[in-house]
Amino acid sequence: MSNRHRRLGAVAVLVAMTAWGPSLAHSYTVATAAPKLADLRGVDDLKTQFNQDQGKIRLVLLVSPT
Amino acid sequence: MCVAGTRWVQTELLQKYPAAHLRVYAVWFNMMPNDSRAKWPPALLTDSRVIHRWDEPKAVGTWYAPRTLTMRPQLTPDSKWGDGEILWDAFLLYGSDGRWDDAPTDLLHWGRTIVAGRETLKTDFEKLFSSKR
C-alpha cells in the first residue's frame, strides 16, 4: 500500500469518527439512562423503598400515563 | 393533566435541583379510558432519582384515598380533592425524617392535581434545596 493510500485511509477514519462518534456516544448515554418501569408488588413494596430512602426528601407521584 | 404535571416536575424541579438529596416514586396506574401500561411515557421523567412502578390494581391510590382525611392539614390550598376512592394525579412530599410503619410520617404537603400544586412544590423545593441548584 502506498503512502498516499495510507494517508487517505487515515483521513477517512478521522472523518468517520467525527461524523459518527458523537451520535454513538449520545446513543450510549440515552440507553444507560433510560428509565425502567417495574411492577409494584403491593403497597408494602413502596413502603420498603420509602424506608430504605430515609434521610432523603421523598416525593410520591400518583399518576396515569395519558 | 398527569403528563403535564410530571413534565413540570422533571423540568422545574428535578432539572433545577440536580444535586438535591431526593427520591421520587412515580406510581403509574390506569385511570382514564385510554390508559394502559403500553402508554407509559419513558421520556417524561428521566432523572435518575426517579423510581418508576406500574400499579395495575391501583393499590397505592386506593390505600391513600381513605387516609386523606387525616392528611387535611397538609393539603395545598389550590388542591381539588373530593374524597374519591382512588387518589391520583396527586403528589405527596415527605421530609427526610419520615418513616413508614403504619403510614408514612413527616408529610410536608400533598395535593391534587400536580399542576394545581405547582406553587407549593416550587416553594417547598426552594426552602429545602436552595443550596443545591
Image (spheres, coloured by chain):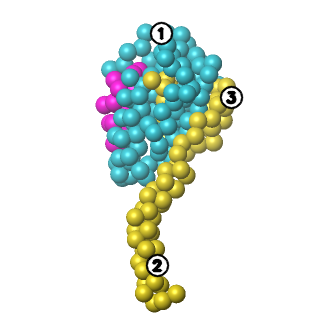
Chain colours: A yellow, B cyan
What is the CA distance from the residue labelled 3 to the residue labelled 1?
Answer: 25 Å
Q: Which mark is residue A9?
A: 2
Q: Which of pointers 2 and 3 lies earlier in the amino acid sequence?
A: 2
Q: Position of residue A51 (x, y in %)?
A: 62, 38
Residue at the image position 62 percent from the left and 22 percent from the top: B56
Q: Quarter-wise, where is residue B77 in the image? A: top left
- Report the magenta residues as a range: B112-127
Q: Main secondary structure of the magenta part?
A: helix
- Residues B59 and B34: in front is B34
Question: Dot 1, crowdedness within 10 Å: few (<14), some or many (≥20)?
Answer: few
What is the three-letter code of the residue carrying label 1?
A: Asp
Q: Chain of mark 1?
A: B
- Identify the secondary structure beneath mark 2: helix
Q: Are marks 2 and 1 on the same chain?
A: no
What is the CA distance from the residue labelled 2 to the residue labelled 1?
Answer: 71 Å
**Membership of B125 in magenta stretch:** yes
Q: Position of residue B72 (x, y in %)?
A: 44, 18
Q: Position of residue B92 (x, y in %)?
A: 47, 28
Q: Chain of mark 2?
A: A
Residue pointed to by mark 1: B83
Q: Chain of mark 3?
A: A
Q: Position of residue B37 (x, y in %)?
A: 56, 26
- Identify the secondary structure beneath mark 3: loop
**Dot in front, 2 or 1:** 2
Residue at the image position 49 percent from the left and 29 percent from the top: A61
Q: Is residue B84 above or below residue B4?
A: above
Q: Which mark is residue A41?
A: 3
